Image (cartoon, rainbow, N blue to C red):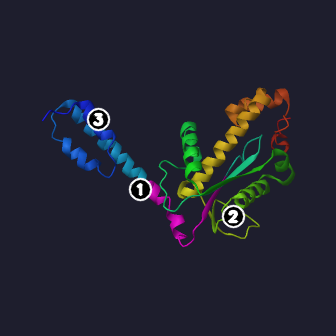
Amino acid sequence: MKELSITDIKNILNNTSSEELDFVINRFSDDSRVGVKKLIASTKRKAEKLALELERIDKMHIYENEYKAYEYIAGVDEVGRGPLAGPVVTAAVILPKDIKILYVNDSKKLSKEKREELFQEIMDKAISTSIGIVSSEQIDSINILNATYRAMKEAVESLKVKPQVVLVDAVTIPDITVLQRGIIKGDEKSISIAAASIIAKVTRDQIMEGYDSIYPEYNFSKNKGYGTLEHINAIKRYGPSPIHRATFIKNFI
């Protein structure tokens, strides 16, 4: 029987499911070629990383599992409480039970490219997603905490499927009748909240990138409205734009 080339073995390893990988690795483990040994070592490292990621994702179902008697569990998170400009954006996400979306995490811990990739996967696989947005003008009127609550309530009430349980990052939402639970650092501990943080973050970033073309002097595509030194200097130089939060920038103008 003709010996498989290193390229053939690489293709086999790359196309083997995680469940069968150990069997395939053992099949080629006695091959004495240096190239094959490197392939096997590299594949083992990838398999170990995958196993750790699957374990992490399983742990992120701990709160969802507490409420497994309920069919629809929504995760809720916000983005944009701290910036000097732009809206606060929240998302609510209902995922299928026991879903495994690898690398879902607190959106702040992910690269822009990974967030956008996961955003699409979440949108494709979620039972329902929705967004709540409260403008800078409303933030100035009712303060950022109440604006965040309003956006969260809007997101929950806009879901096409009504949740029976709502898991929220850090807080609980006033004036909703659904059973809810606030979880400190929930975007690191709950897959539903982490998914919501990604949806909210990507959505808000897209909004701020849109504003950048209207108000280019503030470089919103880069700072997303946060108070970088460059952004503060632009406010001092050009004055506030219509999307700046007057209550947040009163010390600069």
Q: Which residue is mark 2?
A: 172
Residue 91 forms part of the magenta stretch: no
Q: Residue furthest front?
A: 1
Q: Secondary structure at mark 1?
A: helix
Range of magenta residues: 56-77
CA distance separating discs 3 and 2: 50 Å
Q: Secondary structure at mark 2?
A: loop
Observer-nearest residue: 115 or 17?
17
Q: Quadrant of residue 152?
A: bottom right
- Give amino acid for label 3: Lys
Residue 212 seen in this snapshot:
yes
Q: Which residue is mark 3?
A: 10
Q: Which residue is mark 1?
A: 55
- Give amino acid for label 2: Thr
Q: Is residue 84 above or below residue 145?
A: above
Q: Residue, x 42% and y 50% (percent of image)?
A: 53
Observer-nearest residue: 8 or 204?
8
